[in-house]
Image (spheres, rainbow, N blue to C red):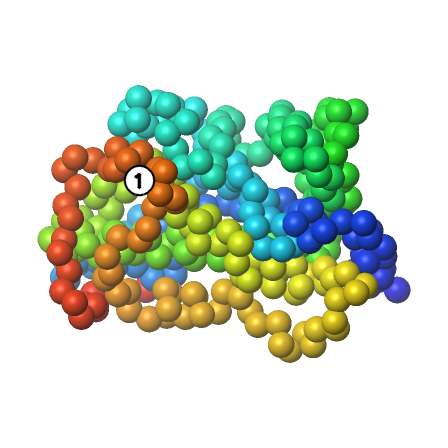
Amino acid sequence: MNAVEEFKRVLPTLLKGYDKKDVLNGDEVGLYWEQSGKRTLLQQGTDPAGSKVSKKRITVFIVAAMDGHMEQMIVINQYSKPRAFSRIHYDTNKLPACMQWKATPKGWMNSTIFKEWLLYLNTTIETQKRNVLLFLDNFSGHECGFELAKEHLTHVRVEWLPPNCTSLLQPIDQGIGNALKIRYRKYLHEHMSKMIFIDKHPMEGVDMLRACVWLGRVWNSLHNTSTVSRCFEKAGFRFESDNEIIPDLISDVVNHDEQDILDQEVLIAGPPAVVDADQVLEMIELFDAKEIKLEMPKNRMTVVLNLKLK
């Protein structure tokens, strides 16, 4: 019996005594927040050959639960106070409430941030009078952070996924991380489309602050959805009492998004809803006063160009 089969065999026993909302998985995904994916939007007459691909990257630590809900995410950058944050007076409390902002020299997760997050999670869960089961991979930042915090984890139990098996067993790797990236690119594409429509450079106005707002909207679109819960099913997370699910019926949760966003032309639509109603005023502050708002026609318009980068 290999490691994957053995883990799936003991998993129902590990899950005993927990509700679906208390079974969590946490992992990092890297997001190149200025990259539009395999294809890009350019103004007519622009030659894509020789175009530089942005290497600007952030780390997003995602925490999802088996019932589909998502915990607050951590966004990690190289800079604690990016220049774009001057528009909110460098007050990271004005970022969407679904995220914490952190900085490390390389913009990666480390043991210090992870330890702080574990203690924060434990305090949050304790106030809710709950106990959670957290599944993690054996990334050194996770292991070292856990060692620093484990004496204080009274309401968080950590279980480690088998080494070199996360592509098969980690729920976030089954589509949640991919869905976050694809839905983020949808907002980037919509912004680029609007800039091209008014004869501006496609990337004008794209900065770290705007990227955080888009990430907040993406989190809101994934929170409490079957996209998240199906990824747990796909990874084999099921209680003994659950009905057996035929694997073929577990659809690839990001296929439709990928089809719409990467393989078809981008459609111009109105701005999507903000993270929640209480943050409407804060979200307005996050945009430049010079932001151009277009009154789009009733019929959605197809943007002209959808060129593959060489």
**Image quadrant of residue 148?**
top right
Helix, strand or loop at label 1? It is: helix
Task: State the residue lying farthest toward the left.
Answer: 199
Residue at the image point whose x is 67% and y is 63% from the top: 233
Q: Position of residue 167 (x, y in %)?
A: 66, 57
Residue at the image point whose x is 57% and y is 72% from the top: 251
Please determine whether, in this image, residue 181 is positioned above or below residue 258. above
Q: Position of residue 12 (x, y in %)?
A: 81, 58
At label 1, the amino acid type is: Val
Q: Is residue 136 left or right of residue 193?
A: right
Please determine whether, in this image, residue 38 is positioned above or below residue 214. below
Q: Position of residue 278 (x, y in %)?
A: 36, 38
Residue at the image point whose x is 55% and y is 62% from the top: 226
Residue identifier under label 1: 280
Quadrant (top left, top right, bottom left, bottom right) of the N terminus: bottom right
Please determine whether, in this image, residue 92 is positioned above or below residue 175. above
Near-viewer residue (187 or 273): 273
